[in-house]
Image (spheres, rainbow, N blue to C red):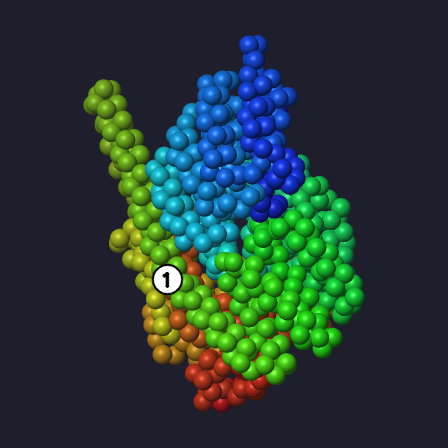
Amino acid sequence: MKNIFLILILALLTTTVKGVQPTLISTHNHTVNVDSTIFYFDKAKTPNGIDTLAFQKGLISINNIVLNDNSIKRIQNKAKEFIGIEKSRFYTSIELALFNAILNAQRYHKAIDLGKEIISRYQATQNADERTLFLSLLTNMRIPFRLSDKLEDGFDYYTTQLKLYLQKNDSVAISICYYVHGGFYATKGLNDLSIYYYKKSILYLNENDTVDGNAYELYSSGRSAWVNNTAVVGKIYNDLGDYHSAILYSRATLKFGVKNKILNTHRPYIHKNIAYAKIMLNELDSVIYYLNIAIAEVKSSKQQVANCYLVKGIYYMHTNQLDSSEFYLNQCNNLIEENNMPANSTDGKLVPNYYRALCRIKQNRYKDAADLLITEISRLGNLRQELINEYSLLVEVYLKLGDVKNAAETFARCNTLREQLEADERSNRKISFETEQKIAAAEGTIANLENERKVAAITQNFLTVGLIVLLIFSIVFLLQRNKITIGKKESDELLLNILPSEVAEELKAKGSADAKQFEGVTVMFTDFKGFTQLSEKLSPKELVGEINECFSAFDHIMQKHGVEKIKTIGDAYMAAGGLPTSNTTHANDVVLAALEIQEFMHEHKAIKEASGQLFFEIRIGVHSGPVIAGIVGIKKFAYDIWGDTVNTASRMESSGEAGKVNVSGTTYELVKDKFNCIHRGKITAKGKGEIDMYFVEVRI
């Protein structure tokens, strides 16, 4: 029976990376009557114990019955008859199978209600099988929330659960809640917040932990969860357009998984993500290799196959092989229609019609392109960024057809969605920071209580042992006081090295630092061109030395111009002017710093070329606007910024050219009187539409 139970758990938990809708054992037409299911469960109860073969047939049949309120209630009542048998393992197996079947039937509200009921019942259990059921449903309840109109309710539910598990110090459940939040934010198109929460989920995992015996630990904790969650971070970096980071995280996951022999179902997902990143970076030599490996490795998930076909179609479109592109995009679409797959797959966004429409546009078949987009828009649900992309393309198609009326209406819908996304981005960041501060405060209180308990215990020991120990303690205290003073100075210096001085002082004074809105900030991104290819030719020591030399120079340049370094992400460097203290010179300061980086990299390249060494070339992007800034993290503090301004600055970098400083029209308006700039025209930036861009040449 335990093998049956493990199959059920794995059927749900493999959806963590694989498909959105978990398939229990097989999916057939709903032709089985609920009476047949009840018959098998009755037959399974014998005087000599449970007939596992009959019980298994009952479980399988649940996924094939017509599910309505009556049939669901009858199965739940029948399940109760198994309570207490073999520690309720049979009972929990039926509950799990029923949830799975309701999810497959796309009765999302019912799945949410059932999942909440079971989680509430078993979240405090000490029974291993009941905890398995609890953790599997806590993980997979994200699916009906994401695919229904209950996404906002999902945020509220998992925030409440997270606070509860923090109080209980249940690290596995905490990690799952952060993981689910990451998926919710990805659905809403807030990919940088998504990455933040996915990384939070990883913080609560121990990648060195190997535990056998309970199925939930295969995907919810330890090494396997670390591999899963890190792989998903790589995927979201692809969605964000940071393809270098996508490759770095994906390769790190592969390396760790291969070393520990735990990749199994993750491997095709990771290979597909690497292939997509390489397409976007125009590093095409190994794309087909990665995709063919991914398709060959897929065992049973049709959704993974569909996603691989989608990326293969994108590759052939990118290389202008339209016939091959359409073939794979059609294959992807056929799988979606045959298996009723949702667009919001956990393996990736299934949007083949968007790319099929691009093929039709290249063939001047605009009416067909419009039909494809209209069909796909109807199934995108909560995927607002994808809706914006498809509406934007549909506007272009309508204009080509001369249909001004539909073009105007579609543009209005697109613009409304974009405004909602930007407004949600601002409000969600504020809510997110407020929640994080409350959580951090709660964790700080818990830590203080632990310290107080330790002090109380030590004090009791002193009273017991007597004055001799107290005297020794006093002598040690006096000897250590100077060390503590020195240590405090060192820790203060370290804090100032991590955080801006104003923020560090607030943190020391209050124990926390409030997130703040800055209306006028200029953000700069830099990125090394061809970093992935170059990194394969350099030794690890040479690579780190090269990056360190460049970034150290950038740090000095930032300090010189009063610009705040925010962070480095792989080979990308991010900085901002106008914070943590607001000023009116932020745009000028950042552009001056960008030009000095440009000059440094020109000189660096010349030196490397003269000595016959490999060298980096850099793209620099700059944009100005409002941001939210604050401290993130519990175990490791980091000062970071969020907002559409950050995303647009990143797009300025990716839309630029090597050796150039590319600024947006917004930044240009702030610096046009101080720098010579060349207008590049309106350039299409991913997820942003057309943006006026300028190359900054020299200071006037």
- Relative vertical location of residue 155 with respect to residue 370 in this rendering, above or below: above
x then y, percent, for residue 381: 52, 58
Query: Quick one: SS at disc 1?
Result: helix
Locate residue 343: give its quadrant.
Answer: bottom right
Mark 1 is surrounded, within 10 Å at the Cα level, by few (under 14), some (14 to 19) or many (20 or more) other residues, namely few
Q: Is residue 245 left or right of 174 when viewed as pictured? A: right
Which residue, given by chain and number where applicable, does mark 1 sit on? 427
In front of the other: 177 or 307: 307
In front of the other: 329 or 160: 329
Can you say which quadrant of the picture contains the N terminus? Answer: top right
Residue occupying the point 31% across, 43% down: 442
- Relative vertical location of residue 473 with respect to residue 408 in this rendering, above or below: above
x then y, percent, for residue 75: 50, 30
In front of the other: 473 or 658: 658
- The residue type indicated by label 1 comes to Ser
Residue occupying the point 57% across, 43% down: 104
Q: Is residue 503 left or right of 251 when viewed as pictured? A: left
Question: Is residue 344 in sight in this rendering?
Answer: yes
- Relative vertical location of residue 43 with respect to residue 286 in this rendering, above or below: above
x then y, percent, for residue 201: 48, 45
Question: Is residue 595 in sight in this rendering?
Answer: no
Q: Is residue 505 left or right of 677 when viewed as pictured? A: left
Residue occupying the point 49% across, 17% down: 85
Q: Residue furthest top?
A: 48
In front of the other: 18 or 696: 18
Q: Is residue 300 left or right of 563 when viewed as pictured? A: right
- Relative vertical location of residue 682 with respect to residue 94 in this rendering, above or below: below
